[in-house]
Image (cartoon, rainbow, N blue to C red):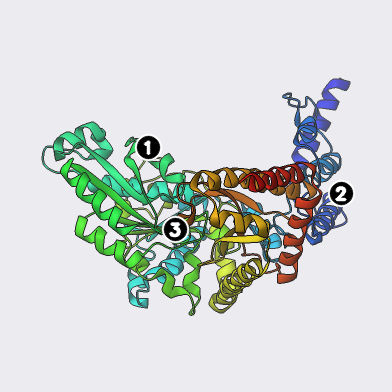
Amino acid sequence: MSDQKHAVANLSNLYRIFTVPESPDSTLGKIDQEISQNLNGFLRDRIVATEQDLAIIEQDFSSPRIPEQPTFVSDYTEFLLDTLVAQSVHTAAPGFVGHMTSALPSFMLPLSRIMTALNQNLVKIETSKAFTPMERQVLGMLHALVYGNDETYYQRWMHDRDSALGAFCSGGTLANITALWVARNKLFPAREGFSGVAREGLHRAFKHYGCEGVAVLISQRGHYSFGKAADLLGIGRDAIIAIPTDRDNRIDIDQLLATCERLAQQRIKILSLVGIAGTTETGNVDPLERLADIAQEQGCHFHVDAAWGGPTLFSRSHKSLLKGIERADSVTIDAHKQLYVPMGAGMVLFKNPCSLTSIEHHAEYILRKGSKDLGSHTLEGSRPGTAMLVHSALNIIGRKGYELLIDKGIDIAHTFADMIESEADFELVTRPELNLLTYRYVPAPIQAALKKASETQRTEINQQLNRLTKQIQKSQRAAGRSFVSRTRLSPPQYGDDTLTVFRVVLANPLTTPGILQEMLAEQKRIASEDEQAVATLNSLDELISGN
């Protein structure tokens, strides 16, 4: 009997965790306050990350066993604060300038609770109600930003049950996959004697349409998500043809045209021509207007990956950098980048509101034809109502606020570039077009030696400098005061040499020129004090002396 009473008590306690606390003085209310205070303290700290080895952190998450008995929420909260929060990366820190993740507006934290508490599923109206028209409005707002149609257009299409201005998804990768999915299905549609590629597959599509294959043309700075898309869509990763870039890291038009001609001779159809508005590595923008012309000449889908640079359209001073984007058949935008909302908010917008019908899927029990269910034309099924956070940002920050944020990011990037060029021991590798740049630490004597070195000597020096860049970046990351990432580029001034360089993303409005100056000073200090870095510099001195 006592076991039965114990079971009933446990069941009662289990039910209780599914109810909303009656007052802030309840146990869960107090826990909520503790979490808020702890997070606020964490977010106010300027340290990027604590110096803790990952292997040690893994020990806290080493058991594969699910606990047999329930744990008190207070105990588990303490565990999270001590092991997870304390060992997280402070992506909002003003010194965290190595990746496309930034500080969030403070209003995002309380508003996120609304989304979590309501737990809406955007796959269907029955599980989302008002969230569905809100998501459609968000897609309409950003569609208007890109394509600039008038109010009448959006009154006609924004809430149309048989179409959609775009698709919401968890990030730029799925947005790019969706764009190519639509492009593939539109390239091989159903017609007499063929039921369409969606039903019959690529082999029969190639045979029916008399081609040897397909290709996606994109610059060598293209995002890796396109390789994933090619894999998933069955066209193969080799179908992604990387076109070399020019001196400004933009797609080389002459090489692109030559590739189009070669593909035509090989009877390979161009599935999509992709332009990039803000490359991941250098932040450059392809000549979108010219690409739109070429796509029109080739009769292919024109997609623009504006996951990073799309919000530049808010800036009256800089939106001309994206001229031609309004001619794209589809555009990817990541709201969790420069729209400053939490992770998990990507979108792909389509110029033609009927484009998404080419990938529609229906099911009698949930996605019936004629409904306004958004899940019928998204790769994901169940999705959270993340559009609510984008809607809040667009309303609370507004056009003018985003313009200020974009302008500040680009301005401080140019300021930092000037700062680097004024330092004798640093070399600016790529100047910012938007708010990304790359550079490396190269003591002045080594810069002088590089200018007069033979091709072989130059390559040897650059290989040693690559080692030095890695050592400085790793030491700076371990120290945790600031963070820059690194990447590999082949600047034309160094022939075929591949350089390892520091990569900086300047989107955090809390980052100041003073913080950037401290970053450079720290890198110089590491170069002169870190044992490995000093050894590499000594090897460079010997190499230069020997030459």
- Is residue 157 depicted above or below 214 in this figure? below
Q: Which one is in front, 102 or 489?
A: 489
Q: Nearer the viewer, mark 2 or mark 1?
A: 1
- Residue density around tag 2, few if under 14, some if 14–19, many if 20 or more, within 10 Å: few
The quadrant of the rendering that contains the N terminus is: top right
- Residue density around tag 3, few if under 14, some if 14–19, many if 20 or more, within 10 Å: many
Type of the residue with mark 1 = Arg
The mark nearer the N terminus, 2 or 3, is 2
Residue at (51% x, 49% y) in the render: 454
- Is residue 514 depicted above or below 354 in this figure? below
Type of the residue with mark 3 = Asn
The quarter of the displayed image where residue 532 is located: top right
Q: Is residue 277 left or right of residue 535?
A: left
Query: Which residue is tagged 3?
Result: 249
* Label of residue 237 in the image: 1
- Please indicate, yes or no, whether residue 196 appears anywhere in the rendered image: yes
Q: Badges 2 and 3: C-beta atoms under 8 Å apart? A: no
Q: Which one is in front, 254 or 448?
A: 448
The mark nearer the N terminus, 2 or 1, is 2
The quarter of the displayed image where residue 111 is located: bottom right
Circle 2 SS class: helix
Query: Which residue is tagged 2?
Result: 27
Alpha carbon of mark 2 to alpha carbon of mark 3: how far? 56 Å
Residue 242 spot, x, y in % from top left: 37, 46
Circle 3 SS class: loop
